[in-house]
Image (cartoon, rainbow, N blue to C red):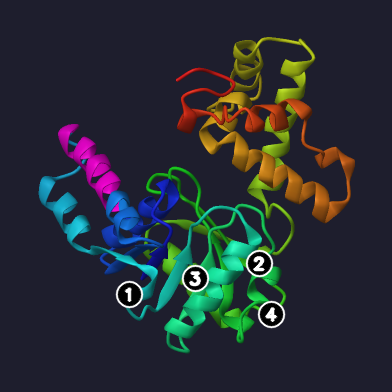
């Protein structure tokens, strides 16, 4: 398996494959970035070992299954999952390069949160082997994988991804392409609406989140969830929902846009709707 993009989602996806016994090439545009991703994986596994939630030899086995590399030196793979940032043009450039490097039987998958599977696939000579494989953060823990078919995705390709998702211990759902797919189309507008409540002074951030945890039985409040996802990611998803649907109910709230401009993005910047 190949995972391209060694950030938080990428190395966690690589860990999931490696834990299932797959040999994984963890790739980024520079080798040092991929090595940093494996180091983050190692630190995460060490915490599990220290808490006695994983045996030391199991952690070592996972790490031994992962080899960092740069894009130009990625080995032939049966499946490549892309987990880079949400930029359509950059994703297209990456897959055009990967198509030249990989054998004809390689399946290409994107972990995009909301971008069009059909549009990304359109950059390939063979768009039928392209599919969405959307993991959720933290990928090593969350069970769901959305398997998204674009307009030209072959049925056997989608079925293969369903099989692989089950094999690595996830629960897949089949999705026909639509902006935001299923989870983010339902969930991120809640984060956006919570930002509106906060901006209007209806309630404090703490009370908005308490309301949804105790009133709707959500395990985490929408504002804390936005901080966990990353407010830049939330904004990108809302912009995609708005532009694809043309429906103003998906218009990003100005507060969300302001916070992204200020680079207060949530947990990854230590400050978002809450401080970390």
Judging by the rendered image, the residue that carries numbered circle 3 is 161
Give the CA separation, mark 3 to mark 1. Answer: 25 Å
The answer to whether residue 210 is left or right of residue 60 is right
Could you say whether the residue bearing mark 1 is in a helix, strand or loop? Answer: helix
Where residue 194 sits, quadrant-wise, is top right
Judging by the rendered image, the residue that carries numbered circle 2 is 117
Residue 179 image point, x, y percent: 74, 55
Judging by the rendered image, the residue that carries numbered circle 4 is 152
For residue 258, above or below residue 103? above
Give the CA separation, mark 4 to mark 1. Answer: 29 Å
* Quarter of the rendering occupied by the N terminus: bottom left
Tag nearer the camera, 2 or 3: 2
Q: Is residue 42 magenta?
A: yes
Tag nearer the camera, 2 or 1: 1
* Quarter of the rendering occupied by the C terminus: top left
Judging by the rendered image, the residue that carries numbered circle 1 is 73
Q: Is residue 161 magenta?
A: no
Residue 111 makes an appearance in the image: yes
> Dot 4: within a 10 Å radius of its alpha carbon, few (fewer than 14), some, or many (20 or more) residues?
some
Tag nearer the camera, 3 or 4: 4
Mark sitting on residue 44: none
> Dot 2: within a 10 Å radius of its alpha carbon, few (fewer than 14), some, or many (20 or more) residues?
many
Give the CA separation, mark 3 to mark 4. Answer: 15 Å
Where residue 134 sits, quadrant-wise, is bottom right
């Amino acid at each position: 398996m190949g995972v391209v993009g060694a950030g938080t989602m990428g190395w966690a996806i690589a860990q999931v494959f490696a834990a299932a016994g797959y040999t994984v090439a963890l790739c980024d545009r520079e080798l040092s970035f991929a090595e940093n991703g494996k180091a983050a994986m190692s630190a995460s596994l060490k915490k599990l070992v220290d808490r006695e939630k994983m045996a030391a030899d199991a952690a070592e086995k996972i790490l031994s299954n992962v080899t960092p590399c740069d894009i130009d030196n990625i080995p032939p793979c049966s499946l490549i999952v892309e987990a880079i940032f949400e930029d359509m043009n950059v994703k297209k450039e990456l897959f055009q390069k990967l198509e030249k490097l990989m054998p004809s039987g390689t399946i290409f998958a994107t972990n995009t949160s909301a971008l069009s599977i059909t549009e990304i696939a359109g950059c390939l000579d063979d768009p039928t082997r392209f599919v969405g494989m959307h993991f959720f953060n933290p990928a090593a823990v969350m069970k769901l994988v959305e398997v998204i078919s674009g307009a030209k995705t072959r049925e056997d390709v989608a079925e293969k991804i369903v099989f692989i998702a089950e094999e690595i211990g996830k629960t897949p759902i089949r999705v026909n392409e639509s902006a935001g797919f299923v989870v983010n189309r339902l969930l991120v507008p809640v984060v956006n609406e919570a930002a509106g409540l906060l901006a209007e002074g209806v309630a404090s951030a703490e009370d908005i989140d308490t309301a949804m945890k105790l009133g709707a039985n959500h395990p985490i409040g929408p504002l804390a969830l936005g901080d966990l996802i990353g407010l830049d990611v939330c904004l990108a998803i809302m912009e995609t929902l708005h532009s694809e649907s043309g429906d103003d109910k998906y218009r990003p709230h100005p507060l969300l846009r302001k916070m992204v401009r200020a680079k207060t993005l949530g947990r990854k910047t230590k400050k978002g709707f809450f401080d970390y």
